C-alpha cells in the first residue's frame, strides 16, 4: 500500500470531534464562516490535515499562512500526543489581527501544543526558516513567485512539506512552482503525491501536494 493510500484510509471526522465546538468558527466571529457552518470543501482540508499528522506524527510543526489557526490546529489534533513545538507565520493581510485570534483558538485545543509561537511575518521577506521542523504547511502567497519563494526557503528545513491549493486552474502559480521544484529536486525527494477532489469521491477540494524528503 502506498503512503497516499495509507493517509486516505486515515481520513475521518475525528478532527471535528476532538476540536472544541466553536474552534472552526472562532466563536462565530470568523468572517470566513459567519454562519457557523464550515463548507464541505474546507472541511475536507481539515480532515486531510488531521490524517496527515496522524500518519507522520510530527513533533515539530510549522505553517506559513496561519490565518485563524484551523489548518495548524487540525495538524495538532492529528498527533497522538501534543506536538513539542508549533510555529506559524502570517502577515495578517487576509484577516486583521488574525494571529491573536489564532492563538486564542489554538489554546482552546485539549490538549494544545506544548509550545506555540506565532509570528507576524511576511514570508516573502524572509530568506530562511528560523528552525527545522518535521512538517511544514505552505498556504501563503499563491502567486508563482510567492509560492516558489516559500517552497525554496522551507525545503531545507523540513522532513515533510505540504503545499496547499495545488490546482492548475484555481492557483496556476502554486501548481507551476510546485511542479518546477519537483523536477529540479528529484535527488532529495523520497516520495511525493497530490491529494485532489478525486480522492474525496467528487467532493470539492482544490488540492494539496505532499513532499517527503530523504
Image (cartoon, rainbow, N blue to C red):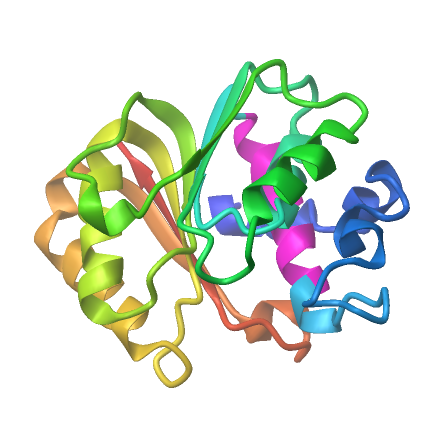
- Residue 74: say if magenta: no
Task: Name the foreground residue: 11 vs 168.
Answer: 168
Q: Position of residue 73 (x, y in %)?
A: 65, 39
At 75% from the left edge and 67% from the top edge, which residue is drawn?
33
Quarter-of-image position of residue 170? bottom left
Q: What segment carries the magenta color?
A: 43-57
In the displayed structure, would residue 93 be above or below residue 127? below
Residue visible at 61% across and 39% down?
Answer: 100
Choose top left, top right, bottom left or bottom right for residue 52.
top right
Q: Is 121 or 1 nearer to us in this picture?
A: 121
Quarter placement of the C terminus? top left
122 or 182, nearer to the observer:
122
Q: How many marks?
A: 0
The x and y percentages for residue 21 are: 90, 46
Residue 108 visible at all: yes
Q: Can residue 189 be seen in this view?
A: no
Is 172 on the left-hand or right-hand side of 12?
Answer: left
Counting from the top left corner in percent of width and height, residue 30 is at 73, 60
Picture coordinates of residue 25 (x, y %)?
79, 56
Q: Which residue lies furthest to the bottom in this view?
A: 169
Amino acid at each position: 500500500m502506498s503512503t497516499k493510500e495509507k493517509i486516505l484510509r486515515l481520513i475521518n471526522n475525528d478532527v471535528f470531534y476532538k476540536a472544541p465546538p466553536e474552534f472552526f468558527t472562532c466563536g462565530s466571529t470568523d468572517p470566513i464562516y459567519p454562519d457557523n457552518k464550515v463548507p464541505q470543501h474546507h472541511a475536507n482540508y481539515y480532515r486531510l490535515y488531521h490524517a496527515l499528522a496522524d500518519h507522520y506524527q510530527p513533533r515539530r510543526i510549522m505553517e506559513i499562512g496561519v490565518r485563524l489557526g484551523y489548518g495548524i490546529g487540525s495538524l495538532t489534533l492529528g498527533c497522538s500526543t501534543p506536538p513539542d513545538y508549533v510555529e506559524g507565520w502570517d502577515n495578517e493581510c487576509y484577516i486583521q489581527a488574525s494571529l491573536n485570534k489564532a492563538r486564542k483558538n489554538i489554546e482552546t485545543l485539549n490538549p494544545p501544543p506544548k509550545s506555540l509561537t506565532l509570528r507576524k511575518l511576511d514570508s516573502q521577506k524572509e530568506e530562511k526558516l528560523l528552525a527545522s521542523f518535521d512538517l511544514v504547511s505552505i498556504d501563503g502567497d499563491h502567486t508563482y513567485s510567492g509560492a516558489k519563494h516559500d517552497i525554496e526557503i522551507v525545503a531545507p528545513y523540513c522532513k515533510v512539506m505540504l503545499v496547499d491549493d495545488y490546482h492548475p486552474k484555481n492557483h496556476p502559480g502554486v501548481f507551476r512552482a510546485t511542479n518546477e521544484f519537483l523536477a529540479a529536486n528529484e535527488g532529495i525527494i523520497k516520495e511525493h503525491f497530490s491529494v485532489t477532489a478525486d480522492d474525496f469521491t467528487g467532493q470539492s477540494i482544490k488540492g494539496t501536494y505532499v513532499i517527503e524528503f530523504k
